[in-house]
Amino acid sequence: MLTTFSDNSSMWVYFNVPEARYLTEAIQLYEQARDGQVKLLGATHPNTLMTLNNLAGAYTLAGRHSDAIPLYEQVRDAEVRVLGPTIRSF
């Protein structure tokens, strides 16, 4: 079990390693982090949104596009609510 939900740096290593076994493990870690963050911080907390975006990226790399798209949309919608529709990310 993860002891901290705000430290995505260790999971970043798993996420960026090309071997499939690490990708599977990264997805499991991101799912654990997501569940804990939603419970402790809420679904719209910036750390939760970062984890959701990272999980969506891991799903995309694993070819799980039908799982990734709703997460990307959830993150986008939350950012639009907070930042407004005219904010650009660079």
Image (cartoon, rainbow, N blue to C red):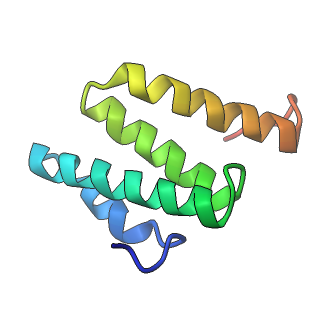
- The residue that appears at 89% across and 35% down in the rendered structure is 84
Quarter of image, res 26 = bottom left
Q: Residue at x 85, y 44 (%)?
A: 82
Check the picture and name the quadrant holding the C terminus: top right
Measuring 86% from the left and 29% from the top, which residue is drawn there?
85
> Residue at position x 52%, y 43% from top?
53
Is residue 13 visible to the viewer in this orientation of the structure?
yes
- Measuring from the top left, give residue 50's x and y in whole percent: 57, 53
Vertical arrangement, residue 75 with respect to residue 51, above or below: above
Relative placement, left or right, of 31 versus 50 is: left
Q: Nearer the viewer, residue 88 or 80?
A: 80
Where in the figure is residue 83, as x and y percent of width and height? 86, 43
- Residue 21 placement, left or right of 29: left
| Camera-nearest residue between 90 and 21 | 21
For the N terminus, the quadrant is: bottom left
Q: Image check: 71 left or right of 78?
A: left
Q: Position of residue 48 (x, y in %)?
A: 60, 55
Residue 59 x, y percent position in the rendering? 34, 34
The reply to whether residue 88 is in sight is no
- When asked about the image quadrant of residue 80, the answer is top right
